[in-house]
Image (cartoon, helix red, strand yellow):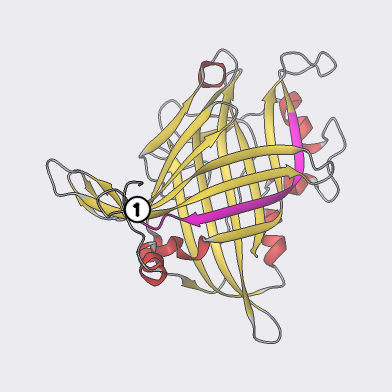
């Protein structure tokens, strides 16, 4: 006979309504989302002799599937200087393909966690995103709850994001955009024809993809989820990407090939996700997920924003 199933062996899941309540602002993520977007990244050019620059600009329209699965049972973190804390979260799997060729561009499994207040160390309620990328990177991004985790009425406020390579002012930490005409030229006139519908204005500010997608929609409410990992400029200067007030907890760990300055250093991430309730003309509603994410790549003495955006609909 096999070992009997008992509560001492397994951690039982809570009922769905309790689980959803404990997920806080993450509760609407559970399920499958699909849609389209845009990806911009400047990559080191160590072997393309036909491009007379130390980088090449890669532009892709994208197709995306993003799935979230509830973790039903409580996750315990044991305390010593304070009592234990328990929280819930979601597994996720992100799959991004090229919008023209359907070639796979990005694969990312991970977790979103809804973390409670702690006293040691003193931390408010926060969200955390843990992700693993096949390039050899693992991220821990964290962010304070916005609007106490409740939705805002109306559509999201989506600020511009800047794709220009930059440095930081040595005194203030503020962003200083590069002015080398040869480096800026591909952002205005790409070496290869950009994907259909991608204009110089979108290359300069990829968040236009998001604002264009919702310009004719009626959005009645919006949850805002903002996380960051070692955000550039978030301490001494103006952040280089949303959120405007990033959480300085977290970071990116990488294999040496992409974690040192020998080739490229991927060392910072900032991201905002908007969960939107959209109203149709007949009064019915559906859920939509938009996000903007900036990862900073460092090489040849500059910081290069790698910007990804997408608009997804819940299935």
Under tag 1, what secondary structure? Answer: strand
Please state the extent of the stretch shown in magenta in the rendering: 57-73
When asked about the image quadrant of residue 308, the answer is top right
Give the number of marks.
1
Relative to 147, does residue 118 appear above or below in the rendering? above
Tell me where residue 255 appears, x and y as whole percent.
51, 20
Which residue is more in the foreground, 79 or 40? 79
Tell me where residue 53 appears, x and y as whole percent.
75, 18
Which residue is more in the foreground, 184 or 10? 10
Which residue is more in the foreground, 203 or 214? 214
Is 287 contained in the magenta span?
no
Tell me where residue 199 appears, x and y as whole percent.
81, 47
Which residue carries the number 1 mark?
126
When asked about the image quadrant of residue 214, the answer is bottom right
Relative to 166, does residue 52 appear above or below in the rendering? above
Is 59 contained in the magenta span?
yes
Measuring 56% from the left and 36% from the top, which residue is drawn there? 295
Q: Residues within 10 Å of mark 1 (few under 14, many from 20)?
A: many
Residue 53 shows in this picture: yes
Instruction: Determine the residue located farthest toward the left in the rendered image.
Output: 81
* Residue 126 placement, left or right of 272: left
Tell me where residue 171 appears, x and y as whole percent.
40, 28
Measuring 42% from the left and 40% from the top, which residue is drawn there? 234
Which quadrant would the C terminus be assigned to in this image?
bottom right
When asked about the image quadrant of residue 133, the answer is top right
Which residue is more in the foreground, 33 or 264? 33
Residue 156 shows in this picture: no
* Residue 156 placement, left or right of 45: left
């Amino acid at each position: 006979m096999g070992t009997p199933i008992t509560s001492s062996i397994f951690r039982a899941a809570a009922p769905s309504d309790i689980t959803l309540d404990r997920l806080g602002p993450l509760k609407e993520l559970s399920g499958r989302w699909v849609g389209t977007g845009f990806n911009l990244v400047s990559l080191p050019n160590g072997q393309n002799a036909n491009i007379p620059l130390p980088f090449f600009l890669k532009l892709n329209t994208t197709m995306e599937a993003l799935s979230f699965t509830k973790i039903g049972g409580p996750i315990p973190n044991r305390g010593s200087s304070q009592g234990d804390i328990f929280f819930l979260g979601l597994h996720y799997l992100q799959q991004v393909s090229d919008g023209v060729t359907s070639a796979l561009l990005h694969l990312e499994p991970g977790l979103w966690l809804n973390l409670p207040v702690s006293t040691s160390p003193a931390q408010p309620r926060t969200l955390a995103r843990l992700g693993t990328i096949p390039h050899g990177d693992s991220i821990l991004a964290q962010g304070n709850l916005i609007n106490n985790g409740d939705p805002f009425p109306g559509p999201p406020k989506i600020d511009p994001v800047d794709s220009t390579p930059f440095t930081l002012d040595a005194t203030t930490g503020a962003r200083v955009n590069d002015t080398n005409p040869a480096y800026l030229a591909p952002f205005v006139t790409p070496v290869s024809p950009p994907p259909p519908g991608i204009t110089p204005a979108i290359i300069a500010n990829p968040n236009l993809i998001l604002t264009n997608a919702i310009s004719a929609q009626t959005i009645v409410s919006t949850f805002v989820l903002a996380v960051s990992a070692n955000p550039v400029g978030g301490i001494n200067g103006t952040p280089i990407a949303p959120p405007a007030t990033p959480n300085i907890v977290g970071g990116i760990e990488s294999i040496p090939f992409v974690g040192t300055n020998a080739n490229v250093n991927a060392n910072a991430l900032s991201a905002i996700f908007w969960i939107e309730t959209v109203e149709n003309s007949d009064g019915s509603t559906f859920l939509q997920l938009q996000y903007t994410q900036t990862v900073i790549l460092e090489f040849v003495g500059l910081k290069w924003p790698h910007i990804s955006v997408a608009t997804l609909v819940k299935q």
